[in-house]
């Protein structure tokens, strides 16, 4: 496996007296796409939110998060973002009252030699549709365009590791394929991505490894090929039966 960009160890999240997440270990290599799949309520969003140090409620979080070997567990969310840990939440991280051009105007300042600072033109090359929609407000974009813009905004901040939470929700199948295969291309350029998805068929086509989360715990993991051939995954998530 390539050098570890992101490492999660003994990560536990509790709301009141209820433990909703308990992940012993998870790692993400340089240029690797790791998929996290599972049913609604399995803890997928809780995992990426806790990794970034963000939450809608007031959970008790313990464990360690290392980014390029640096322990960022005690850092607040803005500091983790500044270090290169970026999350695109399910709601699409864009500003609806700003144009596409304005959403992409701000980039990382002096991110360091080990991080690629994507320009707005780089983003337009990845997503030509955004170039066409440059003067439109974020609120005027389609779901697919918003997802592209959310990814573009994250790239402008020179991420080391990108956390993507349910990027396929609400998108037509063709757009799902476009978005996820673009993510795959970014990883070939060295970006590391932790991809949370309910669309297992789409995810398994682009990930290197996949993790199955149930009731806040990792119950199965393996390469994309191993998970595709696993009867548990095939029957429950891919709609096929293994002999």
Image (tube, rainbow, N blue to C red):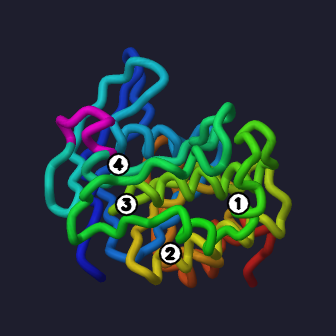
In the picture of the structure, the residue carrying the numbered disc 2 is 186
In the picture of the structure, the residue carrying the numbered disc 4 is 23
- Can you name the residue that lies furthest to the left here? 70
In the picture of the structure, the residue carrying the numbered disc 1 is 130
Quarter of the image that includes the N terminus: bottom left
Quarter of the image that includes the C terminus: bottom right
Task: Answer yes or no: is residue 16 visible.
Answer: yes
Distance (Cα) linking label 4 and label 2: 27 Å
Q: Are marks 4 and 3 in contact (CB under 8 Å)?
A: no
Q: Are marks 4 and 1 in contact (CB under 8 Å)?
A: no
In the picture of the structure, the residue carrying the numbered disc 3 is 158
* Mark with earlier residue (4, 2): 4
Location of residue 114 (image quadrant): bottom left
User: Disc 4 on helix, strand or loop?
Assistant: strand
Rendered position, 197 above or below 207: above
Q: Residue at x 43, y 39 (%)?
A: 49
* Mark with earlier residue (4, 1): 4
* Mark with earlier residue (3, 2): 3
Q: Nearer the viewer, residue 16 or 65?
A: 65
Question: Is 79 inside the magenta-drawn segment?
Answer: yes
**Which residues are the magenta region?**
73-81
Distance (Cα) linking label 2 and label 1: 17 Å
């Amino acid at each position: 496996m390539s050098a570890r960009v992101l490492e999660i160890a003994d990560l536990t999240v509790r709301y009141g007296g209820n433990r909703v997440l308990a992940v012993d270990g998870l790692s993400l290599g340089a240029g690797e796409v790791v998929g996290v799949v599972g049913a609604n309520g399995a803890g997928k969003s809780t995992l990426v939110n806790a990794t970034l140090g963000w939450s809608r409620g007031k959970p008790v979080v313990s464990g360690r998060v290392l980014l390029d070997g640096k322990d960022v567990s005690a850092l607040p969310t803005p500091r983790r973002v500044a270090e290169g840990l970026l999350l695109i939440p399910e709601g699409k991280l864009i500003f609806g009252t700003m144009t596409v051009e304005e959403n992409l105007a701000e980039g990382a300042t002096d991110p360091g030699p080990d991080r690629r600072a994507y320009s707005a033109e780089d983003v337009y090359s990845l997503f030509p549709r955004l170039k066409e929609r440059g003067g439109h407000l974020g609120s005027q974009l389609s779901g697919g365009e918003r997802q592209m813009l959310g990814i573009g905004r994250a790239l402008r901040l020179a991420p080391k590791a990108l956390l993507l939470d349910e990027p396929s929700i609400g998108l037509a199948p063709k757009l799902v394929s476009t978005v996820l295969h673009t993510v795959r291309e970014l990883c070939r350029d060295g970006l590391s991505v932790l991809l949370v998805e309910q669309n297992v068929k789409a995810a398994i086509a682009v990930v290197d490894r996949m993790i199955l989360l149930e009731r806040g715990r990792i119950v199965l993991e393996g390469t994309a090929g191993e998970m595709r051939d696993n009867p548990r995954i095939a029957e429950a998530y891919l709609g096929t039966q293994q002999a």
